[in-house]
């Protein structure tokens, strides 16, 4: 493009002319949300900013932004791309500039952005099927090298636009929504939605996600070091298009009536069900080979509702959250269907809990990109048994390593406690922190943080601000204390806890914790324990007899389990321990297994198949459990759904499966 075609505004922003015309929007091969490919027409030419808005340009509107330069390990020069800008702030800048110059500036629509990016091309990138001289940072947010954010360093496309593939993700005007197949003119997505479109990818984005057609999305208030924007100047008011939503399996024909339960007094252990069932057709939604991190809730209508993530790999942008429903009185779970996804964000941590007030609460991490360790966390709720959901609110709006990956619980005051993993990369420590809701359940506060008393973490008699171990299982005790168990990956932690699982106790609602060895074996990678308070006033703890690191080495020892009659069985795998004195003692332990003829099961996720018999149960997995008013306990792993009751747990090792 001839430089004489450029136009410069009053604050030094360069604009390129974009001709009127039409193009085929979308791509038919790779990402489901890029389909269907459809024709888009632009009735008038418009001007698009040649490069993303820079620091010096934005700060003429908001001088305070200078304090945010360089956050996240990026360069911070005047001509670097302006980042740490939310959608709302980008819109405010456009409105300020419009008033200042008496012109109509706004964010580009998604269609305008892709049309301008392609610049008449039909290839994956505006320069062809591959990017020239491509460099990115492998989505590593813990790197030590400074990331260069200087604008205009590569080659422009055919219409003179720089940095359309990489550098920063760019806000678009549209709400994110599925494409419609019809031909459209000057379109701008639907009138409402949950999150906004971003385009272009960033320095932390892999090449396949930098294509001209690739779509991303983010919550409007997202602010981070990889998201910026550019403007268009035009007189065109884009047209909102409709949105067609497919009802998900978990939304269809949901009863809003409360069932009448009948307590089951006889011992019951039913054959495990498979709750992770693929969709019936590929067109019904994403479903990947790796399904993991389950969460379960018993709804007011008697349905069981389970969520988990599905992915090709855990640190992938494709990772999404699926859900399934076991309807009251049914014996087969619905097929899995997508439950929560923000396009091209890793969503690896998810949890749900049913509150006595009738609301079903959902918590989820939203990664900045494809890594699972740099995320914000949100919550939302449903008042109609999981059919519709409120808008997201932040559990934690600052990007951190917090992951709401464990079972939330309700404390004695009716507040929600949300355990969340936290990692200290510098000290190579990991544990679980606790968020507690306000009395009105509309906001959350982290109770304390490990960094305040790092030196005491995991000492035998010391106190600190973390639950020992990631994936902590937490339970409020009747005297107001909190009891927690966690994983034992660190060698130091195993030595301090005398080869046992670490047990954490808090007397101040999670602000500080003391540590001691639990009476249980440690667990490790690919294992997660859980705690459940029963209606019968007992507490049940679910865990594994051998840590994963011993399973991997072949050093499998099992453990002696004492049943309610004092009989000892040496068993291996998943077990339950029952306490009747608020966790002071655990006199009853029993394998979650059957005495029927041996049968092979696939537990899902990264866990190998196993043979269930009288002395062998599932060797590893992530567990979570709820209890129904009829006394039935529903325990899920990453694929299997176990069903039994307290009378069965108390019946002794000799009683096995019933139908």
Image (tube, rainbow, N blue to C red):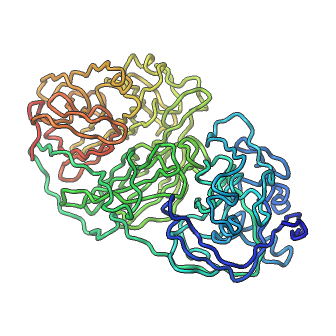
- Residue 383 spot, x, y in % from top left: 38, 66
- Residue 546 spot, x, y in % from top left: 31, 25
Q: Is residue 166 above or below residue 556?
A: below
Which quarter of the image is occupied by the N terminus? bottom right
Residue in the image at 69% along x and 64% along y = 117
Q: Nearer the viewer, residue 533 or 364?
A: 364
Using the rendered view, name the quadrant where residue 571 is placed.
Answer: top left
Residue 417 at least partly seen: yes
> Going by the image, does 143 lie left or right of 418?
right
Q: Nearer the viewer, residue 113 or 542?
A: 113
Q: Is residue 178 above or below residue 295?
A: below
- Residue 416 spot, x, y in % from top left: 43, 50
Residue in the image at 78% along x and 48% along y = 69
Using the rendered view, name the quadrant where residue 650 is placed.
Answer: top left
Q: Is residue 271 above or below residue 105?
A: above
- Residue 542 spot, x, y in % from top left: 29, 35
> Going by the image, does 442 lie left or right of 454?
left
Residue 412 at least partly seen: no
């Amino acid at each position: 493009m001839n430089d004489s075609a450029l136009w410069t505004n009053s604050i030094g922003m360069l604009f390129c002319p974009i001709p009127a015309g039409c193009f085929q929007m979308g791509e038919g091969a790779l990402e489901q949300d890029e389909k269907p490919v459809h024709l888009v027409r632009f009735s008038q030419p418009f001007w698009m900013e040649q490069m993303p808005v820079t620091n010096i340009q934005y700060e003429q509107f908001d001088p305070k932004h200078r304090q945010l330069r360089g956050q996240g390990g990026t360069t911070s020069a005047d001509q670097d791309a302006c980042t740490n800008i939310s959608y709302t702030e980008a819109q405010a800048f456009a409105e300020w500039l419009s008033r200042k110059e008496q012109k109509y500036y706004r964010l580009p629509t998604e269609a305008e952005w892709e049309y301008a990016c392609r610049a008449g091309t039909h290839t994956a990138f505006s320069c062809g099927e591959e990017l020239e001289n491509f460099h990115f940072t492998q989505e590593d947010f813990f790197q030590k090298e400074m990331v260069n954010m200087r604008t205009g360093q590569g080659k422009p496309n055919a219409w003179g636009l720089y940095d359309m593939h990489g550098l920063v993700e760019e806000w678009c005007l549209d709400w994110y929504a599925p494409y419609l197949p019809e031909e459209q003119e000057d379109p701008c997505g639907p009138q409402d939605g949950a999150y906004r479109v971003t385009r272009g990818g960033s320095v932390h984005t892999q090449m396949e996600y930098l294509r001209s057609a690739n779509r991303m999305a983010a919550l409007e208030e997202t602010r981070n070091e990889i998201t910026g924007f550019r403007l268009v100047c035009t007189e065109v008011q884009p047209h909102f298009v409709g949105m067609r939503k497919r009802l998900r399996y978990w939304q269809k024909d949901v009863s809003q009536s409360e069932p009448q339960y009948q307590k089951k007094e006889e011992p019951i252990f039913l054959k495990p069900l498979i709750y992770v069932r693929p969709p019936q057709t590929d067109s019904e939604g994403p479903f990947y080979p790796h399904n993991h991190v389950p969460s379960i809730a018993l709804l007011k209508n008697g349905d069981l509702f389970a969520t988990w993530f599905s992915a090709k790999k855990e640190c992938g942008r494709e990772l999404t959250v699926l859900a399934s429903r076991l309807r009251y009185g049914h014996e087969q779970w619905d097929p899995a269907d997508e439950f929560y996804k923000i396009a091209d964000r890793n969503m690896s941590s998810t949890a749900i809990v049913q509150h006595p007030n009738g609301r079903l609460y959902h918590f989820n991490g939203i990664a900045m990109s494809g890594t699972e360790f740099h995320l914000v966390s949100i919550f939302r709720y449903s008042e109609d048994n999981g059919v519709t959901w409120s808008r997201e609110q932040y559990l934690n709006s600052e990007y951190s390593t917090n992951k709401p990956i464990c079972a939330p619980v309700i404390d004695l005051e009716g507040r929600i406690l949300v355990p969340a993993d936290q990692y200290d990369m510098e000290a190579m420590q990991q544990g679980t922190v606790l968020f507690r809701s306000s009395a009105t359940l509309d906001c959350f506060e982290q109770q304390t943080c490990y960094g305040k008393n790092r030196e005491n973490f995991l000492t035998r008699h010391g106190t600190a601000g973390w639950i020992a171990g990631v994936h902590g299982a937490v339970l409020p005790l009747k005297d107001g204390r909190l009891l927690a168990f966690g994983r034992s990956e660190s060698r130091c932690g195993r030595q301090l806890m005398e080869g046992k699982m670490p047990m954490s106790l808090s007397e101040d609602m999670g602000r500080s914790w003391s540590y001691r060895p639990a009476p249980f074996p440690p667990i490790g990678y690919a294992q997660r324990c859980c705690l459940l308070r029963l209606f019968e006033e007992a507490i049940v703890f679910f865990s594994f007899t051998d840590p994963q690191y011993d399973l991997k080495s072949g050093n499998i020892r099992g453990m002696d389990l004492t049943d309610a009659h004092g009989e000892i069985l040496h068993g291996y795998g998943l077990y339950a321990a029952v306490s009747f004195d608020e966790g002071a003692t655990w006199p009853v332990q029993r394998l979650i297994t059957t005495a029927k003829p041996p049968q092979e099961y696939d537990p899902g996720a990264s866990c190998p198949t196993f043979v269930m018999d009288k002395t062998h149960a599932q060797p590893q997995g992530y567990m979570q459990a709820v209890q129904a008013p009829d006394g039935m306990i529903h325990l899920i792993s990453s694929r299997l759904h176990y069903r039994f009751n307290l009378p069965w747990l108390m019946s002794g090792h000799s009683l096995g499966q019933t139908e």
